Amino acid sequence: MKIIHTADLHLDSAIDTLPTDKSRVRRDEILRTFERLCEYAKVNGVKAVIIAGDAFDGARVFKKTAGRFLEAVKSASDTDFLYLSGNHDRAFLQTYGDILPENFKVFKNEWTTYRYDGVAITGIALDKYNAPFAYDNLRLNENDINIVCMHGQVLGYRSEEAAETVSIPMLKNKFIDYLALGHIHSYAEGKIDERGKFAYSGCLDGRGFDETGVKGFVLIDTGAKGVSTEFIPFCSRLFVEKEYATDGETSFYAFRNRIVEEMRALFAPESIVKVILTGGHDADFIVDKEDLALRLNENFFFAKVYDKTAVKVSEKDYEFDKSVRGEFVRKVLSSDLTEEEKNAVILTGLNALKGEL
């Protein structure tokens, strides 16, 4: 039997990383990715889709988004969608709980189980009231294939914020074969005990540069050989980040051209890219991050450039310079400013002395 494990769609998220027009496009793409997942489930005979929390991003759920979401679920009528509220999306059920399709089933505030031919899928929406007792109250049949669904940060033991954490030690020897988790936005997995493992599916599609790399879902197969899993890349476009150091560079524009050429070779045009410039450079090496961003935006869906370089200046370089420039640099270097502040002041001052500001 095939089962999909997904989580953290965060539909209707603001996506502040992007300009307004591209943020709007990106929100629609993320919703479309969920619709594509429903189409995948229908075509590939997936019996159940586990949504392990945070399908929506907050109390504001647009009617249009909810309509498309529920229509996509309804269109895959032979697939059950097993929905767990996370820490972001509990308002969704309060608003739309009365119009849910028949194949949309909910994990409640006590352990709830849905059964499919020897496979038991059990989940609980943790809160501050049930979290202290949830682990003790979990009862699973040793002879079932047991998939458990929870939402929270994996910790070694219980924590004070029990409603937002999942304790792996408290789940040992509970006959769990696979623990489907939500909350962490990158794919990750680990062992529970000799029998079972846990996994975060990660978000289905990235929303910012804190969600870089390939995103997708976990395909679970409960065949004769037990439970097998495979991560399926499924996102519509990638957020990518790369650093480039200015050390040893003498021409910014030659440096810029190499960056653009390499980024084009590494990443698809639909990517959303972030370039971080690092390292040190001489005062005469002018970092033109706006020009680099312009060139990258000509080649990608959207690009940002951050300048974290530093000017390499020492008093020795200006020890015998009797000009205004030398006096200025020596004064700044002997001041009480931080190194970062000194670099910024020196760079601005030298540019001003050259008439470039």
Image (cartoon, rainbow, N blue to C red):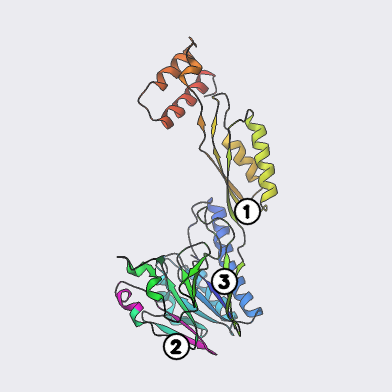
The residue drawn where x is 60% and y is 82% is: 225
Task: Mark yes or no: residue 137 visible.
Answer: yes
The residue identified by callout 3 is 218
Tell me the SS state at disc 1: loop
Label 3 Cα crowd, 10 Å radius (few <14 / some 14-19 / many 20+): many
Residue 243 located left or right of residue 339: right
Q: Which numbered disc flags the more N-terminal residue, 2 or 3?
A: 2
Q: Which of 296 and 59 lies nearest the eye of the viewer?
A: 296
Q: Which residues are magenta?
A: 114-135
How far is the residue under mark 1 from the one under mark 2?
Answer: 46 Å
Residue 133: x %, y % from top left: 31, 78
Q: Disc 1 residue type?
A: Ser
The residue identified by callout 1 is 271
The residue drawn where x is 39% and y is 85% is: 139
Residue 25: x %, y % from top left: 58, 58
**Residue 141 tag number:** 2
Indicate yes or no whether the magenta region holds residue 68. no
Q: Based on the displayed image, in which of its 4 quarters is residue 71 positioned?
A: bottom right
How far is the residue under mark 2 from the one under mark 3?
Answer: 24 Å
